[in-house]
Image (cartoon, rainbow, N blue to C red):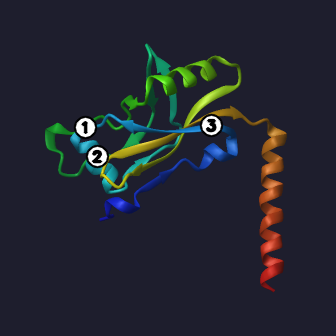
């Protein structure tokens, strides 16, 4: 079982599909069985997104596995989860969300030093196909340069 300090669940597709504009760290409203599953590292951010509804930020589609000892108290694996941000941050995110081509994407879920689950979210702009090709080329060039340096 993983310790709380090294839980770091990343959304690997986010940096490939989106250009990150600004990031925020938010708390997540969770039930007891959800935090226990996250502490075991049994969560995923695939196809997860955030949206602003009625002045609140919600994370939709995040997968948290059912807790193995949860019995009838277990949670739904893909339920919507409220994020805890300041009013100023929510207003900034809401303004950016209205602009065409901008999205709010979660980047990673982690446990902070106080034992609370936090999520890094970002205001991001979707990349075009040619931007993705440039990202792949830059990554391959970096790999080949690293290989040359080792030999």
Question: For residue 93, what is the image quadrant?
Answer: top right
Q: Which numbered disc covers residue 133?
A: none
- Residue furthest bottom as drawn: 151
Picture layout, residue 139 above or below residue 126: below
Residue identifier under label 2? 35
Furthest toward the top, the residue is 54
Quarter of the image that includes the N terminus: bottom left
Q: Which one is earlier in the sequence, the residue at label 1 or at label 3?
A: 3
Give me the residue at 44% from left, 16% from top: 55
Labelled pair 2, 3 in contact (Cβ < 8 Å): no
Residue displayed at 77% across by 68% down: 143
Q: Position of residue 4 (x, y in %)?
A: 32, 59
Distance from the alpha carbon under mark 2 to that under mark 3: 26 Å
Task: Find residue 119 and report its image quarter.
Answer: top left
Q: Which label belongs to residue 22?
A: 3
* Neighbour tally class for label 3: few under 14, some 14-19, many 20 plus, Cα within 10 Å: few
User: Which secondary structure, mark 1?
Assistant: loop
Report whether 15 appears left or right of 137.
left
User: How much space separates mark 1 and mark 2, taking CA atoms?
Assistant: 7 Å
Q: Which mark is residue 31?
A: 1
- Circles 1 and 2, Cβ within 8 Å, touching? The answer is yes
**As rendered, which of 114 and 12 lies closer to the eye?**
114
Residue farthest to the left, as pictured: 72
Image side of residue 135 versus residue 123, left or right: right
- Where, quadrant-wise, is the C terminus in this rendering? bottom right
Q: Residue at x 70, y 19 (%)?
A: 100
Q: Residue at x 69, y 46 (%)?
A: 16
Of labels 1 and 3, the one closer to you: 3
Q: Residues within 10 Å of mark 1 (few under 14, many from 20)?
A: few
Distance from the alpha carbon under mark 1 to that under mark 3: 28 Å
| Residue most extreme to the front | 88
Return the x and y of residue 73 as percentages of the image width and height: 16, 38
């Amino acid at each position: 079982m993983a310790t709380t300090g090294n839980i770091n669940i990343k959304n690997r597709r986010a940096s490939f599909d989106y250009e990150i504009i600004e990031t925020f760290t938010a708390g997540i409203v969770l039930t007891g069985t959800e935090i226990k599953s996250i502490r075991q590292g049994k969560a995923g951010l695939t196809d997860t997104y955030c949206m602003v509804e009625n002045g609140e930020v919600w994370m939709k589609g995040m997968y948290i596995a059912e807790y193995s000892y949860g019995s009838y108290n277990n949670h739904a694996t893909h339920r919507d989860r409220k994020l805890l941000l300041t009013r100023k941050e929510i207003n900034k995110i809401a303004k950016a969300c209205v602009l065409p081509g901008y999205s709010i994407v979660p980047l990673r879920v982690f446990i902070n030093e106080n034992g609370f689950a936090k999520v890094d979210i970002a205001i991001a702009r979707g990349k075009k196909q040619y931007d993705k090709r440039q990202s792949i080329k830059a990554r391959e060039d970096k790999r080949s340069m690293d290989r040359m340096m080792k030999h």
